Each structure stands twice: as C-alpha cells, then as structure tokens.
C-alpha cells in the first residue's frame, strides 16, 4: 500500500471520527453531579432508560465526569469527556419499590456535601427532606404520576458497576438477575442523540430536596 493511499485512509478515518453526532441547542451543565442532579445527568439517565426500555433508570454521579456539554455540534469526544465509565454495560434489574426508596435514601444521605453515590434518574419524580434522619429522608416517589408502593416491582436500568454494588449500593441490591441490554453507557447516549438530532436540556427537577 502506497504512502499516498495510507494518507487518504488516515484523513478519511480522522474525519469520520470527528463527525457530528447531533447538536445541543443549549449547554448541558454537569459541574457538580455529586451534589445534585444536572442536565447532563438527566440526559444520560434518559438514554440509559431508552436503550433498556425500562420503567426507570438510575445513574450514579461516579459514572459522570464534571464539566459541561457546550451548545453546538456534539462529537464522540464530547461524550467521552463527561463519562468516567463509558464502557460500562447498561443492565436492567427488577427490584421492589422498597429497594428504589432505599437507593434514593442512600443517594440523599450525603446531601449537600457531595457524594459519588448521588443518583440521577429518569422515569420518576422523587423528593427528600435534607434534615430528615439517614435512610428516612425520601418523602415521595412517583412513577407515571402515581406513588410508588414498596411492594411494587419495577424494571430499573443502570450501569453494570452500579448494579454490582458500586458506591455502597451493594447494601440495596447485589446484581440480582441483571439483564444486559447489549449497549454501553456511551453507545446508549450516542444512539439517543443521533435519533433526535437536536437535543435541549431538561431543567425540570426529578430528584432533589423539597
């Protein structure tokens, strides 16, 4: 193979790698995902839930890198820059409402000092009392507009490291019969953005203090 052909292949590969995935109509903040939900965290959770076709999704702050997805063209490097574990598989657990509550209580435990255990979610709205006792801070969880009963069973999509108990969540679940979606966190986000073309930040609270 000639040097000229190799040069053409290199240029073609470089252009392909930098091809736009989509466009952000505004910036997606993710400066402190360990202290509260962010626009980027919501997007990641939406993408994880979408790829797994689950009832809800949970993504721990430890999966996210601090930074901002700037408005404008989105490239693969922009996604990688905001993920700590982009290669994590997306899996689904079937757990009880009581376990969802326990997980959210753990997420709220360190608020507002910050913790990689803080959870970003999709498919639900929940509130907690920052002054409440540990493991009893969550005051409400609603899925599809209805209060989530402790006895209910829901499918929850999440990164495999979280399903395996990262950030102390082994106290809530232990990778109990997880099902792999075939996607990674990175590919889930990429597919989610590509399917929509233009994306806008969702600034409506999903999980936070009352």
Image (cartoon, grey):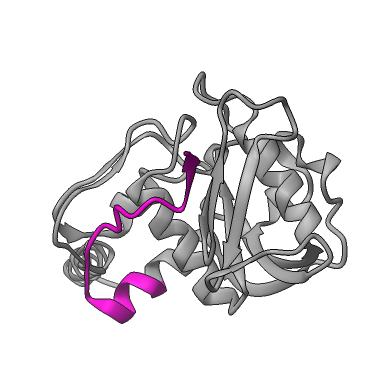
Report the magenta residues as a range: 191-210
**Quadrant the N terminus occupies:** bottom left
Number of marks present in the image shown: 0
Residue 18 image position (x, y, % from top left): 22, 61
Q: What residue appears at the point 62 percent right and 44 percent down from the top-left corner? A: 139
Q: Position of residue 72 (x, y in %)?
A: 12, 57
Which residue is drawn at the image coordinates 48% and 41% (left, top)? 208
* 109 sits to left or right of 163: left
Residue placed at 52% from the left, 55% from the top? 121
Asked whether the viewer can see residue 187, the reply is no
Residue 201 on the magenta segment? yes
The extreme top residue here reads 113
- Quadrant position of residue 13: bottom left
Quadrant of residue 90 within the rendered picture: bottom right
Q: Does any portion of residue 171 appear in the rendered image? A: yes
Give the residue at x 86% y 51%. Answer: 174
Nearest to the observer: residue 203 or residue 167: 203
Q: Percent position (x, y) of residue 111?
A: 54, 26
Asked if 31 appears above or below 123 in the picture, the reply is: above
Lateral position of residue 92 relative to residue 130, left or right: right
Left or right: residue 138 compared with residue 207: right
128 in relation to 185, above or below: above
- In magenta stretch: residue 7: no
Q: Which of 66 and 41 is in front in this view?
A: 41
């Amino acid at each position: 193979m000639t040097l000229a052909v190799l040069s053409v292949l290199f240029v073609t590969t470089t252009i392909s790698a930098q091809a736009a995935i989509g466009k952000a109509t505004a910036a997606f903040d993710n400066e402190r995902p360990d202290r509260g939900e962010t626009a980027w965290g919501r997007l990641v959770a939406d993408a994880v839930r979408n790829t797994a076709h689950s009832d809800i999704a949970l993504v721990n702050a430890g999966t996210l890198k601090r930074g901002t997805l700037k408005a404008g063209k989105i490239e693969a490097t922009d996604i990688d820059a905001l993920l700590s574990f982009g290669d994590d598989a997306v899996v689904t657990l079937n757990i009880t409402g009581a376990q969802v509550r326990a997980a959210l209580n753990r997420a709220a435990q360190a608020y507002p000092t910050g913790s990689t255990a803080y959870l970003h979610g999709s498919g639900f709205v929940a509130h907690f009392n920052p002054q409440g006792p540990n493991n009893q801070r969550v005051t409400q969880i609603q899925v599809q507009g209805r209060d989530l009963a402790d006895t209910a069973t829901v499918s929850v999509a999440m990164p495999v490291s979280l399903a395996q108990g990262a950030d102390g969540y082994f106290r809530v679940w232990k990778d109990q019969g997880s099902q792999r979606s075939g996607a990674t966190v990175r590919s889930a986000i990429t597919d989610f953005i590509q399917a929509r073309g233009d994306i806008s930040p969702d600034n409506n609270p999903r999980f936070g203090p009352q």
